[in-house]
Image: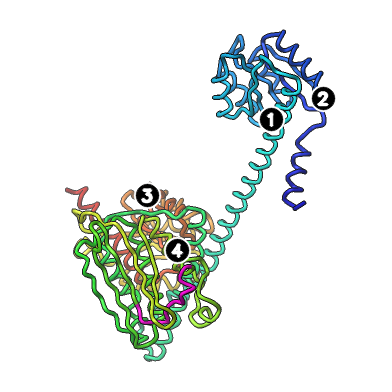
Amino acid sequence: MTADREAYHAAMDQAAPLVPSILMVEDNLGDATLLTEYLAESRFACTIRHCRLLGEAIEVLGTDSFQVVLLDLILPDSKGLQTFNAVHGKAPAVPIVILTGFSDEELASQAVKLGAQDYLPKDGITGLQLARTIRYAMERKRAESVLQLAKESAEAANKAKDRFIASLSHELRTPLTPVLTQVQILERDARLPTDVREAMAMIRRNIELEARLIDDLLDTTRVASGKMELRPVVVDVHSLLRHSVEICRAEIDRKGLRLALALSAASPWICADPDRLQQVFWNLLNNAVKFTPSGGTITLSTENHAPGRVAVTVADTGAGIETDLLPRIFEPFEQGGRTVTRKFGGLGLGLAISRSIVNLHEGMLTADSTGEGNGARFRVELRTVAKSAQPPASDRLPHGVAHAPKRILLVEDHDNTAKVMTLLLSSFGHQVTHARTVADAIAIATADKPDLLISDIGLPDASGLDLMRRLRALYPQLTGIVISGYGAADDVRQSSEAGFSKHLTKPFNDRALQEAIERVSADSATKGAAVSS
């Protein structure tokens, strides 16, 4: 007998008393007497409590414990499903067997669908049949209870795992943030020798890789739990692809790769979550860069291969995919063996996450290769939509607003992060005031209202969300950006509900921070212009 079966039977034995107590709710005294005699004749050991009215039964259920309720649905003070719902609502853990007359079987069947264990016609019943029905009802209810406990235990374990991974992510991200920010500042410092700035670029790339691995682990848990959410808008596939190229351009140039663009799709507009789809294209392009040797070629192309469809293809002349690996290439942690893992690194999660994202968009992601050393070809197919009447918001930054210097209130209790972020924001031309606590931040904002709040969530004396709510109560037009090690969908939703316009997950690069400031400032200016007009 396995441990699971032993636990199951132990729970069943613990829940089953030697002599069950039965509550019989029956207004007909003759029927009640016969049912009692039937149980005695069948030698079914039990104790019976008899009630004639629903109100009396409800009162008894509130004070005494029973293992079964034998219930007539038609009582002097209650009729039909109302009777069942009242008893079931009072004692949902107690199995109920419906006692029914000839004309009430349809009603009893409905009660079973609502949670009753079984029903028995009173006409023609035998003692053995009654005893067997009661016994089976108790066993089924106990089995349901055990399964429910197992389900609740599994759900609790999953929640604990999710909380652990989220906390681990936060703890891993937080120390990376000041390191990445400082490295980016040094990388742009023209006073440093070229070899030092190149070393800074190498460090930055590896920190960004670590951050990507953390994101992949979180995304894997979101996919497994069905918690990955999409925020679809109408977007141009070509703009997402060009952005992916920009992100990978430095590595493409470093390896001396040739990039061929053939973005020929005449209808590139789709309804998609731009951030998530950007993640897919970046993954595919980054894989092509990783697996293509220096001097190789990567081809990025689009086509409308069928009406209402657009296909994006990323092809390379790199390492290729072994034939026996192709069917497993989109499975989590699949990298094609230890040799590939040692040579190229990574966790083998990018393609699995990418296919899940494409599937959520009701699209298709496929892979093809003629074998090792012959390159690989990945193809994303998606539905197209009519071109949006308005261009994407990111293309409509009001002139002169995005790059105007801002008075920024930075609220961050991690001293190293605060120091390097102050340097970075100052290098953008902004005036930065730093606060470590919510109390200090409110005092500073009251004395000199900032243009923009940039705040961590976890602060010593309260939450950054609380800070934003309190400041918005004083200054309704104040805009804000969250910087946090927590970046799950619930975290982003909560920051938005608190009044923040943007949620940046640590560690973020200088480009992401600058774009967030520009976007938030532009949106604020647009709203202000609309109000004044």
Region in magenta: 316-327
Q: Position of residue 343 (x, y in %)?
A: 50, 83
321 falls in the magenta region: yes
Q: Which amino acid, by three-letter code, is at mark 3?
A: Arg
| Residue 183, visible in the rendered structure | no
Look at mark 1 in the image and give the residue it sits on: 137
- Foreground tag (3 vs 1): 1
Give the Cα separation between the discs numbered 4 and 2. Answer: 59 Å
Label 1 Cα crowd, 10 Å radius (few <14 / some 14-19 / many 20+): many
Label 3 Cα crowd, 10 Å radius (few <14 / some 14-19 / many 20+): some
Mark 1 vs 4, N-terminal side: 1
Look at mark 3 in the image and give the residue it sits on: 472
Q: Which mark is residue 45?
A: 2
The image quarter in which residue 228 lies: bottom left
Mark 2 vs 1, N-terminal side: 2
Give the Cα separation between the discs numbered 1 and 4. Answer: 45 Å
Mark 3 vs 1, N-terminal side: 1
Label 4 Cα crowd, 10 Å radius (few <14 / some 14-19 / many 20+): many
Mark 4 vs 2, N-terminal side: 2
